[in-house]
Image: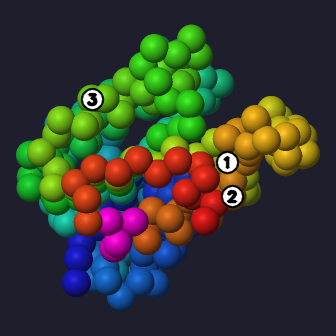
Amino acid sequence: MKTAIVIGATGLIGHHLLTQLLADSTYSKIVALTRKPIEYNHEKLVNHVIDFNNLNKYQDYFIGDILFSCLGTTKKQAGSIENQRMVDVDYQYQAAKMAAENGVAHYVLVSSSGANKNANSAYFKMKGELEDKVKPLSFQRISILQPSLLLGERDHFRLGEVLSSYLLPIICKLPFLKRYRPIEGVQVATKMLNVSKAQKEPFEIYTLDELFK
């Protein structure tokens, strides 16, 4: 019986993951660290509302067997690239570092297809930088998932993603574009849960093709 810590539990992937974790007998306690309260109760769920600008105050909340990191934002939501970087890199790295310092054994991160610290795209560059920053941390196992465009219902409207969700499945039938085909958020959440129970190697990256299996 394990304790899971989840950041980003109210997002597209995070809320699916939380639902699955609560239903899974492997986990007896789920600690969700969120900016706003989760609007339902469950006997296995512990929800702490925290200020991510002062993460160092919450070291004691990062105690458990595994940290699932689903946190992320967009430039539009954050207001600027600098603010987006704060969420997508700084918060994520600080959370991972505190979990590693507390002896959490396994770290599961949602990154992105195309993540590369040398990318021209600010988004892919941030994802690549975070991947490189967390790799040296003292987890027994690290799992990095690299989905592309995420499909599913969100609590806010994103015009670009709505348009892409219609166009990309058609465009990506071309062999050289398959790596960019969209994937449902619930599929990524399911893969995260499966990886948390099955991975034996100390480090694995799960590409888009592996997420579709």
Q: Disc 3 or 2, which lies upstream in sequence?
A: 3
Q: Amino acid at mark 3?
A: Lys
Relative horizontal placement of residue 185, taking residue 88 as reference (left or right): right
Residue 173 location in percent, x, y? 85, 46
Q: Position of residue 126 (x, y in %)?
A: 45, 23
| Residue type (three-letter) at the residue carrying disc 1 | Leu
Could you tell me which secondary element the residue under label 2 belongs to? strand
Amino acid of disc 2: Glu
Quarter of the figure with the N terminus = bottom left
Q: Specify the label residue 184 is tagged with.
A: 2
Residue sitting nearer the eye, 15 or 171: 171
Where residue 166 sits in the image (x, y, percent)? 90, 46
Residue 126 in sight: no
Q: Which residue is mark 3?
A: 133
Q: Secondary structure at mark 3?
A: helix
81 left or right of 57 in image: right
Gap between marks 2 and 1 measured at Cα = 6 Å
Q: Nearer the viewer, residue 80 or 26?
A: 26
Tell me if residue 103 can be seen. yes
Q: Are marks 2 and 1 in contact (CB under 8 Å)?
A: yes
Quadrant into which the C terminus falls:
bottom right
Q: Which residue is mark 1?
A: 150
Residue shown at 70%/39% (left/top)?
Answer: 180
Q: Which residues are magenta?
A: 195-199
Q: CA distance from mark 3 to mark 2?
A: 27 Å
Q: Specify few, some or many for label 3: CA neighbours under 10 Å numbering under 14, 14-19, or 20 or more.
A: some
